[in-house]
Amino acid sequence: MKRILTLALIVFALVFSNSTNAQNKYKFGHIDSNQLLSIMPERVAAKKQLENLAKQLEDNLTSMQAEFEKKYTEYVAKADSLSPLIRQTKEAELGEMQQRVQAFQQNAQKELSNKESELLQPIIEKAKDAISLVADEQGFTYVFDIGTGVVLYFSDDSIDILPLVKTKLGIL
């Protein structure tokens, strides 16, 4: 009987110590990557560059649209007095001009999107690297990004590593 009781106590102790070790084995953290990116100084500079490019493109588009409107207004005012050949030529010219405006608008949107990706990619990589360094230094098993909306739940035991990453990046 003593042997069975001793064996049961040993098994219980082993199971309890294994479950305790398993609970302490994993360390979870979370970060709001959107908040981190919004406070990075590089983001402000990138945003300024994007705004400048957008303004240049918008000014060009506005100029092209104004020129089209002017020519269209002139055409409408003179359309009745023009010969069929001249009217047809003007209409074709206006159609081509409108296509150029539309093409410029599409290309401008594409250029702006490409520039945004080009400017943000190094900032995102810098943030990821800092998160990885902090996670390694602090011994985190998992770090969840709560800014992307992927994590459905995290407990109070999860540690917000944003302050640690901000310190790693030198952001106050």
Image (spheres, rainbow, N blue to C red):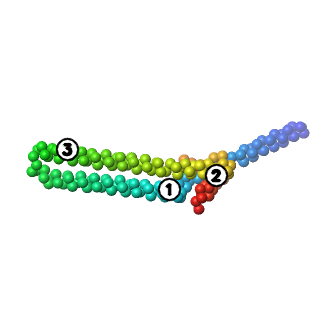
For the residue marked with disc 1, what is the amino acid? Answer: Arg
Percent across and percent down for residue 105 are: 33, 49
Q: Earlier in the sequence, mark 2 or mark 1?
A: 1
Foreground label between 3 and 2: 3
Percent across and percent down for residue 8 are: 83, 40
For residue 43, the mark is: 1
Residue at image point 66% right, 46% down: 141
Left or right of 21 in this view: 93: left
User: Relative to the observer, which residue lies in front, 160 or 53?
Assistant: 53
For the C terminus, the image quarter is: bottom right
Task: For residue 100, say whether it is visible.
Answer: yes
Residue at image point 20% right, 52% down: 72
For the residue marked with disc 3, what is the amino acid? Answer: Ala
Residue at image point 47% right, 48% down: 118
For the N terminus, the image quarter is: top right
Alpha carbons under labels 3 and 1: distance apart: 45 Å
Q: Which residue is mark 3?
A: 92
Percent across and percent down for residue 43 are: 50, 56
Q: Which residue is mark 2?
A: 134
**Number of numbered markers:** 3
Q: Quadrant of residue 169?
A: bottom right
Say few, some or many: other residues with alpha carbon within 10 Å of mark 3 (under 14 / 14 to 19 / 20 or more): few
For the residue marked with disc 2, what is the amino acid? Answer: Val
Question: Element at badge 1?
Answer: helix
Residues at marks 3 and 2 touching, judged by CB atoms closer than 8 Å: no
